[in-house]
Amino acid sequence: MDAFVANPTRLVLAALCGLVILLTLIIKGKFQPLIAILISALGIGLLAGMPVSMIVDTVTKP
């Protein structure tokens, strides 16, 4: 598998969007924090441009 290299600006923007998603899910959506963290982490990965297969492997790896 090839190594993933992302644009630093895109990573910062993805992290900021992920933080907004996290806070919105917890405060407004009343989601459990663990579920909200998982959803925001998936969002950050997608916004950063990671391949979906790499995101799934990263989340499911023990």
Image (spheres, rainbow, N blue to C red):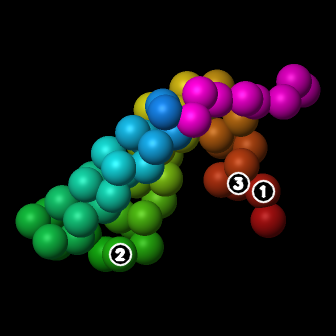
Using the image, tell me which numbered label, if any, was put on residue 61.
1
Q: Verify whether residue 14 appears in magenta.
A: no
Task: Name the residue rendered at 18%, 60% in the picture.
Answer: 24
Task: Name the kind of residue labelled 2 in the image.
Answer: Pro
Task: Name the residue rendered at 70%, 54% in the picture.
Answer: 60
From the viewer's perspective, tell me whether residue 25 is left or right of residue 34.
left
Task: Name the kind of residue labelled 1 in the image.
Answer: Lys
Q: Verify whether residue 2 appears in magenta.
A: yes
Task: Report the residue marked by disc 3.
Answer: 60
Q: Main secondary structure of the magenta part?
A: loop
Disc nearer the start of the sequence (2/3):
2
Task: Name the kind of residue labelled 3 in the image.
Answer: Thr
Task: Report the residue marked by disc 2.
Answer: 33
Task: Name the residue rendered at 71%, 35% in the picture.
Answer: 54
Asked if the residues shown at circle 2 and circle 3 are in contact, with their CB atoms under 8 angstroms apart, the answer is no
Q: Residues within 10 Å of mark 3 (few under 14, many from 20)?
A: few
From the viewer's perspective, tell me whether residue 52 is left or right of residue 9.
right
Query: Do we see residue 46 in this rendering?
Result: no
Disc nearer the start of the sequence (1/2):
2
Asked if the residues shown at circle 1 and circle 3 are in contact, with their CB atoms under 8 angstroms apart, the answer is yes
Asked if the residues shown at circle 1 and circle 2 are in contact, with their CB atoms under 8 angstroms apart, the answer is no
Q: What separation in Å lies between label 1 and label 3 (alpha carbons)?
A: 4 Å
Range of the magenta residues? Answer: 1-8
Can you tell which quarter of the image residue 13 is in? top left
Q: Secondary structure at mark 1?
A: loop
Vertical side of 21 occupied by 27: above or below: below
